[in-house]
Amino acid sequence: MSHHSDDLALCRALAGEAAAILREGHGRAQPIELKGPVDLVTEYDRRVEALIVRRLRAADPQARIVGEEGGAQGSAGAERVWYVDPLDGTTNFAHGLPIFSVSIALYVAGEPRCGLVHAPALGWEFAASRGGGATLNGDAIRVSATATLDGALLVTGFPYDRRTTSELNLDNFGAFVRRTQGVRRLGSAALDLCFVARGWLDGYWERKLHPWDVAAGALIAAEAGARLTDLAGGPPHVEQGEIVASNGRIHDAMLAVLADVRAGRAE
């Protein structure tokens, strides 16, 4: 499979199968395991990832697969790498909240090729291929036109080790609360990025991320016109663990707030 459209079609088919499984489990009482004090995993995380990995192995046997639950499989030197988050927003899912998604992305030689984020309970499919734009349920999407930080609605997240780490993101959160119209915490990094792509949110920042959290959403946001950097304004990378995404117009102002917090200058 060498064409963007073939790869995206595979993402779409896999996400469709995964979505059916997640819809089956959403809202049902189910056993929950803890990977950490607040890091949940359900049987549906594992069922969906097993399905996607099995299908990818059959369709693209030379590729490397990096998944949340099963770790990395395949050659470390593989040119094609699939990033799979079978259930982004597990805590939401376990509580019956419909803000969760399955996220699948393909990177080739370190560059994004295609990505898809499917929110089964909401009926939303965000998709993008490199150079081909971004869509929501097949319709083209673009980032917002909000021009100033004080008129912006932002979103962020907090780390799973928040009971022990000193890097809680609360200092950044507080600084942005004082400088924007509002800050949300929705519980799915993949959807956070897609909501920036759609223009429902104007900017997003987060640290302590995994590549499967952002691999698809970052491409979708970029193809919708978003600007993406690390927290210091440098080039972003899927393995980096941190990201700032915005409509572009408020990006420098967001970076300035983050810099002020780091330097202890925030109010």
Image (tube, rainbow, N blue to C red):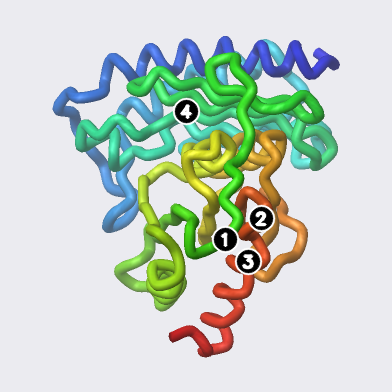
Crowd tier of the residue under label 4, counting other residues whose Cα lies within 10 Å: few below 14, some 14–19, many 20 or above: many
Secondary structure category for the residue under label 2: loop
Q: Which residue is mark 2?
A: 249
- Residues under labels 3 and 1: Cα distance? 19 Å
Is 238 placed above or below 180 here? above
Q: Nearer the viewer, residue 223 or 130?
A: 223
At horizontal 37% and vertical 39% (from top left) the residue drawn is: 89
Crowd tier of the residue under label 2, counting other residues whose Cα lies within 10 Å: few below 14, some 14–19, many 20 or above: some
Q: Position of residue 35 (x, y in %)?
A: 34, 49
At horizontal 58% and vertical 87% (from top left) the residue drawn is: 263
- Residues under labels 2 and 3: Cα distance? 16 Å
Q: Position of 43 compared to 142: left or right?
A: left
**Between marks 4 and 3 in the image, the one whose residue lies nearer the viewer:** 3
Do the CB atoms of the residues marked 1 and 2 lie less than 8 Å apart? yes
- Residues under labels 1 and 2: Cα distance? 7 Å
Identify the disc placed on residue 102.
Answer: 4
Of mark 3 and mark 1, the one earlier in the sequence is 1
Q: Nearer the viewer, residue 160 or 72?
A: 160
Q: The residue under label 1 is which amino acid type?
A: Thr
Q: Position of residue 227 (x, y in %)?
A: 70, 50
Q: The residue under label 2 is which amino acid type?
A: Arg
Q: The residue under label 3 is which amino acid type?
A: Leu
Secondary structure category for the residue under label 3: loop
Crowd tier of the residue under label 3, counting other residues whose Cα lies within 10 Å: few below 14, some 14–19, many 20 or above: many
Of mark 4 and mark 1, the one earlier in the sequence is 4
Q: Which residue is mark 3?
A: 231
Secondary structure category for the residue under label 4: strand
Identify the disc placed on residue 148.
Answer: 1
Crowd tier of the residue under label 1, counting other residues whose Cα lies within 10 Å: few below 14, some 14–19, many 20 or above: some
Q: Quadrant of the C terminus?
A: bottom left
Q: Position of residue 49 (x, y in %)?
A: 48, 26
- Residues under labels 4 and 1: Cα distance? 32 Å
